[in-house]
């Protein structure tokens, strides 16, 4: 029996994870957390002993002694749980990419100390992990992340000035929470994933590419030194990577339908970095290192929330992030306190950037 602590239980990933756990008798939910949604009914329906709304996820994890932490909290709020699981050598199934983006160096150090498993749940990284399994690092020439391109793919920059939150929330291929859906529309999500891939697989940025692949059936590819590429292909359904991480290494069955290959659209195109500058901003923040990725993430969270509330336009999201990155010092964080301070400073600067001049 594997005891799973599910953080972010009421979200898009959280709800799908509950279904995955319910389908596997060898998995048991020992704890659930949400940000603010009451959990009493959900916890009693699934016989969960420890349920917590808000508060400190680390306290919950210490109480429930899980075998696996599935971190499906959205945003920087997930960072404490990520570092706790890595430090304690508790298997971490990670959906909360923001924590690895913000705390990359601290997370790598914690993983080394804890010697536990860090299993990606993000579909592209689950795909990369599966393509890389058992390969010697010296044979890997590069990683390729695919992006759907979001609802505004093909539009020029000028055509993006007036798009609404409702339009940004209408994702063509994935059904996800609001923050990641807007991130997909700006391509910030692929920027976060670029940084996430760098920390998960220890591959430098200049060997990680992003291509737009509108049908989202190829989740990622690995380039090998002999010219071969391995791709991970399947229907875009998060239950597959959630199940793979929670049942690793058994690859348990799911009821996700098999992909019909006849007539499959496997087209790829380069991302439009003029219309979607967030990808280049993320790459630059990643290459700059220190707390620059933390600032990228913090400013993006502030700007996306403001966009969803109708306080700024779609193109302002990248402008706020760019301005914030230009103002932060980006000094490396020695510990979680430093990181929390860098996150707060970037949020303060980003919020100032929202004010009308
Ligand atoms: N959705 C996807 O298909 C997908 C795919 C790949 C990666 N991811 C990543 O997975 C994470 C979750 O995404 P999502 O789409 O599931 O988001 P979501 O639907 O917005 O759900 C977020 C969850 O986090 C909880 N939460 C928010 N703030 C919290 C806090 N301060 N402390 C504890 N819990 C908090 C929410 O609780 P309340 O319900 O109470 O607000 C909710 O349960 C994100 O990092 C995202 O990038 C998602």
Image: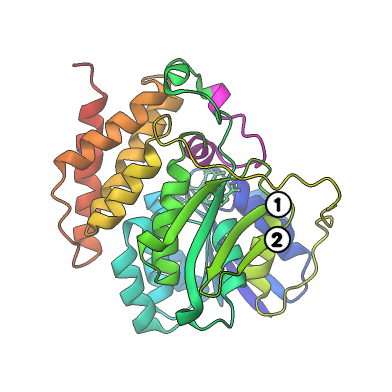
Q: Residue at x 25, y 63 (%)?
A: 336
Q: Which residue is mark 1?
A: 237
Q: Please tell me how crowded label 2 is: few (under 14), some (14-19), or many (20+) other residues with Cα within 10 Å.
A: many
Nearer to us in this view, 271 or 79: 271
Q: Residue at x 66, y 51 (%)?
A: 15
Residue 343: x and y in percent read: 25, 49
In reply to whether residue 19 is colored magenta, the answer given is no
Quadrant of the rendered structure where residue 1 is? bottom right
Residue 94 is left or right of residue 1, and the answer is: left
Is 321 placed above or below 192 here?
above
Nearer to us in this view, 304 or 126: 126
Dot label at residue 240: 2
Quadrant of the rendered structure where residue 233 is? bottom right
Nearer to us in this view, 73 or 248: 248
Q: Secondary structure at mark 2?
A: helix
Q: Please tell me how crowded label 1 is: few (under 14), some (14-19), or many (20+) other residues with Cα within 10 Å.
A: some
Magenta span: 166-184
Residue 50 seen anywhere in this rendered image of the structure: no
Name the image quarter holding the C terminus: top left
Asked if the residue under mark 1 is in contact with the one under mark 2, i.e. CB atoms within 8 Å, the reply is yes
In reply to whether residue 172 is colored magenta, the answer given is yes
Is 344 placed above or below 89 here?
above
Residue 48 is left or right of residue 278, and the answer is: right
Is 309 placed above or below 185 here?
above
Residue 61: x and y in percent read: 47, 69
Q: Secondary structure at mark 1?
A: loop
Residue 148: x and y in percent read: 59, 42
Q: Is mark 2 within 8 Å of ligand 1?
A: no
């Amino acid at each position: 029996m594997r005891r799973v602590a599910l953080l972010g239980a009421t979200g898009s990933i959280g709800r799908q994870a509950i279904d995955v756990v319910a389908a596997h008798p060898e998995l048991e939910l020992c704890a659930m957390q949400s940000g603010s949604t009451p959990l009493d009914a959900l916890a009693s329906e699934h016989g969960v002993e420890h349920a917590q709304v808000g508060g400190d996820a680390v306290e919950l994890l210490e109480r429930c002694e899980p075998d696996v932490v599935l971190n499906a909290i959205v945003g920087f709020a997930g960072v404490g749980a990520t570092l706790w699981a890595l430090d304690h050598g508790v298997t971490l199934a990670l959906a909360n990419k923001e924590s690895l983006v913000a705390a990359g160096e601290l997370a790598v150090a914690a993983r080394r100390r804890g010697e536990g498993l860090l299993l990606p749940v993000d579909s592209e990284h689950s795909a990369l992990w599966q393509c890389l399994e058992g390969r010697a690092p010296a044979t890997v020439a590069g990683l390729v992340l695919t992006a759907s391109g979001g609802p505004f793919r093909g539009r020029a920059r000028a055509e993006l000035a007036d798009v609404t939150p409702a339009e940004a929330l209408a994702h063509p291929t994935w059904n996800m929470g609001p923050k990641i859906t807007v991130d997909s529309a700006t391509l910030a999500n692929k920027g976060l994933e670029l940084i996430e891939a760098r920390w998960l697989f220890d591959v430098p940025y200049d060997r990680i590419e992003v291509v737009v692949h509108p049908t989202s059936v190829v989740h990622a590819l690995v380039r090998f030194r002999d010219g071969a590429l391995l791709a991970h292909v399947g229907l875009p359904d998060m239950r597959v990577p959630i199940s793979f991480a929670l049942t690793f290494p058994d690859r348990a069955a799911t009821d996700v339908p098999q992909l019909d290959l006849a007539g499959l659209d496997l087209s790829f195109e380069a991302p439009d970095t003029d219309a979607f500058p967030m990808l280049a901003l993320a790459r630059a923040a990643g290459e700059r290192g220190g707390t620059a990725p933390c600032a990228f993430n913090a400013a993006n969270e502030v700007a996306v929330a403001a966009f969803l509330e109708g306080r700024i336009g779609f193109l302002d999201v990248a402008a706020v992030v760019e301005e914030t990155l230009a103002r932060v010092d980006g000094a490396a964080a020695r510990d979680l306190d430093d990181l929390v301070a860098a996150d707060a400073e970037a949020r303060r600067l980003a919020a100032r950037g929202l004010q009308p001049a």
